[in-house]
Amino acid sequence: MISIVLVESQWASHVGAVARSMANFGFSDLVLINPLCDAKELDAVKRAKHALPILKKAKVKDASYLKKFDTLVGTTSRVGTDFNIPRSPLSAEDLASVFLPLDKKKQHIGLLFGREGEGLHNDEIALCDFVVTIPSSVKYPALNLSHAVAVVLYELFKASSRKKVGESITPIGRAEKNRLLALISQVIDTAGFSTLEKKETQKKVWKRLIGKSFLSKREAFALFGFFRKMK
């Protein structure tokens, strides 16, 4: 299941517009993390139109809920260079291609969208397996929240309508991913890196690689074996 997750939304009208975009492209699970508005107020209802059932069923959670997703994908207009690993993004179109072969019924995936004014903070980006951006003008790259949601969901919807080749894979879940990353971290800690900063860079790189790869259980077991040998 793919959930649309909004962090500290300020305007009820924006939440309603997001619900409408979700309905347009066949998504139904909306999660609000520490919202700063009442998503049930009239402005939200008016903007949601026929997506009112999505709005009514929206879950209100705190930030700890983000750790429950098997895969958490952040969205950002502030992209990094090759040296800013956490903010090195895929495009929305690339994300759709990555999602295409997945059996999403067996994975709980969160698409995380930030605040209207500030986007996602660095600590929230750090929780994500990887990030996605929407190509836009360098003069004004930040999209309106509901517009950003609509573009990403459109790309996913468009990709899902293509003919799928081969069987869907079942990627590893959050618990297996965390165990693998913990093992890799242990190997990195015992390797001959000269500084703590270089070790942390390695850990960030491996987290992004594992997050973007959607490893099957068989692939993950092979990596477990490899890194145990390294250890």
Image (cartoon, rainbow, N blue to C red):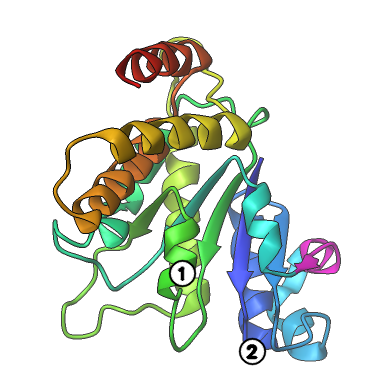
**Residue appearing at x 35%, y 52% in the figure:** 92
| Residue identified by numbered label 2 | 11
Q: In the rendered view of the protein, which quadrant contains the N terminus?
A: top right
Q: Where is residue 13 in the image (x, y as percent from the top left)?
A: 66, 86
**Residue appearing at x 39%, y 35% in the figure:** 186
Q: In the rendered view of the protein, which quadrant contains the C terminus?
A: top left
Q: Nearer the viewer, mark 1 or mark 2?
A: 1
**Quarter of the rendering containing residue 81:** bottom left
- Give amino acid for label 1: Asp
Q: Which label number is shown at residue 123?
A: 1
Crowding at dot 2, Cα within 10 Å, few <14 / some 14-19 / many 20+, comes out as: some
Determine the CA span between mark 1 and mark 2: 23 Å
Q: Position of residue 208 (x, y in %)?
A: 34, 44
- Give amino acid for label 2: Trp
Q: What element carries label 1?
A: helix
Q: Are marks 1 and 2 in contact (CB under 8 Å)?
A: no
Of 35 and 121, the residue lying toward us: 121
Q: Is mark 2 on a helix, strand or loop?
A: loop
Q: Which span is picked out in magenta?
A: 52-61
**Residue appearing at x 49%, y 57% in the figure:** 127
Q: Which of marks 1 and 2 is nearer the N terminus?
A: 2
Q: Position of residue 115 (x, y in %)?
A: 52, 81
Of 141 and 196, the residue lying toward us: 196
Q: Position of residue 198 (x, y in %)?
A: 19, 52
User: Is residue 19 in the magenta section?
Assistant: no
**Quarter of the rendering containing residue 94:** top left
